[in-house]
Image (tube, helix red, strand yellow):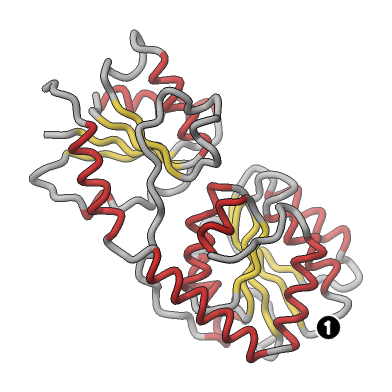
Amino acid sequence: MPRVFLLSDEPPALPLGDLPRERFLTAAQRIEPTPRGWLTAAAAAVGFAPHVVHAVGPRSAKLAYLLKRLPKFGLPAGTAVVVSGVANPGESWATRRAVAAILPHEVTPAPSPPDPAAFRREHDIPEAARLVVAAGRFDGPNGLLSAVLAFDALKYCEPELYLLVVGDGPERERSENYARSIGFDDFRTRFAPPGADRRAAMAAADIVWVCGGPDAVPILLEAMASGKPVVAAGPAAFAEVLGRPAFPPGDRIAVAARTRELLADPAAAAQLAAADRARALQAFPPGAVAARLAALYDELTPSRP
């Protein structure tokens, strides 16, 4: 029976639970961004003795590659490695010669939207305010910090607009402190607690921003499926998923300008939201990845016990 181990930068998002249990034995581990987290994930992966390791995200891809290159202390000989959520994985030092395949993500069913009034009270946002939700990770200048900067450029033109930032990452505290330092005279940026339900936040938004790198593609798909207009700034993978251009990473002026256009034209915003949702559901339907995973894992499983 194929043994499949999932390494992920974020809580596991691939539908391993949808694989036929009579055909696959699976386990999963998230890599915490600390030395102890790396060691814990490495020990779990090696101890499972997998036939296939599926690494989701750049951090997981690096660890899978290192374990692949250390056969004495790492993965068993013949272990296949699958990578998702990494830009140009065939050219990356982290994954070259270890990549078996790259799989797309999929849209999962959206949760029920929260009560709008209760949601806004919870985050100290006036009930009548318009709301932008920025989703991604605090992991550098092109992540959620760029959303904070974009809102600082936008808020003086939109006095009824608030920003809710949803995400985690090593730069979170720094970004919060910076947001307060530049917004002390008119502070309308809110930060959802770590681990907050970003899909519920998207459902309460007027516009959703997605900022980040290739590992933010699942977040982009969630935003598209939310039925809200999406403004995205990120790598080429964003444009491939959207089916239309995305703004360059960190281009806060373009993000702010496009948001003003959508706020001023509700019909255009609704049209964009409907188009994004339709593309997400048609191009990345629920269940599609599980079937492809099953076929791929079967193909990659070597002839060893």
> Residue extending furthest right?
185
| 140 on left or right of 38 | right
Which residue is more in the foreground, 200 or 274? 274
User: Would you name the residue on which mark 1 appears?
Assistant: 159
Residue at point 77%, 79% (across, down): 260
Q: How many marks?
A: 1
| 135 on left or right of 151 | left
Please tell me whether residue 257 is drawn above or below residue 118 in the rendered image: above
Please tell me whether residue 170 is drawn above or below residue 301 in the rendered image: below
Which residue is more in the foreground, 89 or 72? 89
Asked which quadrant contains residue 163, the reply is bottom right
Residue type at tag 1 = Pro
Q: Position of residue 199 (x, y in %)?
A: 49, 69
The C terminus lies in quadrant: top left
Residue at point 18%, 25% (across, down): 302
Residue at point 87%, 73% (across, down): 186
Q: Position of residue 129 (x, y in %)?
A: 71, 86
Please tell me whether residue 120 is drawn above or below residue 290 in the rendered image: below
> Residue extending furthest left?
22
| 152 on left or right of 229 | right
Q: Position of residue 26 (x, y in %)?
A: 22, 40
Mark 1: secondary structure? loop
